[in-house]
Amino acid sequence: MSQLIAFIEKAKSDKDLMAKLDALGENAGADEIIKLAKEYSFTVTEEEIEKQKSSEDSSGELSEDELESVAGGGSANRYNPDVCKDLPKTRFECVGFMSLCWCDHHRRTHDPISPGWGTKARYFHTCVMGAYSYRGDKEGGRRGQ
């Protein structure tokens, strides 16, 4: 498993670390991420960060190999009633740091019937807490966004 994925898995079970990642936000620089990872004894490289940021599948889903490597499971409950109740679609609050820690309340199902999308994948996104329900791309964006 990559050090970056292991670092994110650690954050799922460590509320303090997750709070630090959330504070960095979605536009955190590689140097900030590397420094924080080092504080927690992870060796994350700029190349690994850039690869994840440019990955076609930044949905937070792990490969089969990565799933087998994860020991235990952490909560990714990112629901905050003060913020989430007004979300019209998935945002940083739903997907977490580098879109690697999707909220437990988010559901994404493949939507094969969306005319006009061409070859772009389409999905139905729903928050089980009632915040949003819409069709969008794999990462949660709506068409044209």
Image (cartoon, helix red, strand yellow):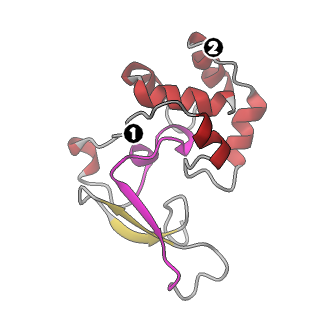
Label 2 secondary element: helix
Image: 86 above or below 30: below
Image: 7 above or below 92: above
Image quadrant of residue 7?
A: top right
Image quadrant of residue 41?
A: top right
Q: Are marks 1 and 2 in contact (CB under 8 Å)?
A: no
What residue is shown at x 59% (from left), y 81% (from top)?
117
Disc 1 designates what residue? 76
**Front-most of residues 67 and 42:** 67
Where residue 37 sits: x, y (%)?
60, 19
Residue type, label 1: Ala
**Front-most of residues 12 and 134:** 12
What residue is shown at x 57% (from left), y 87% (from top)?
116
Residue 19 is inside the magenta segment: no
How many residues crowd mark 2 within 10 Å: few (<14), some (14–19), many (20+)? few
Disc 2 designates what residue? 38
Mark count: 2
Which quarter of the figure is the N terminus placed in? top right
How many residues crowd mark 1 within 10 Å: few (<14), some (14–19), many (20+)? many
Residue 93 is inside the magenta segment: yes
Left or right, 81 with reference to 43: left
**Front-most of residues 72 and 103:** 72
The residues bearing labels 1 and 2 have C-alpha atoms spaced at a distance of 22 Å
Where residue 118 sits: x, y (%)?
65, 83
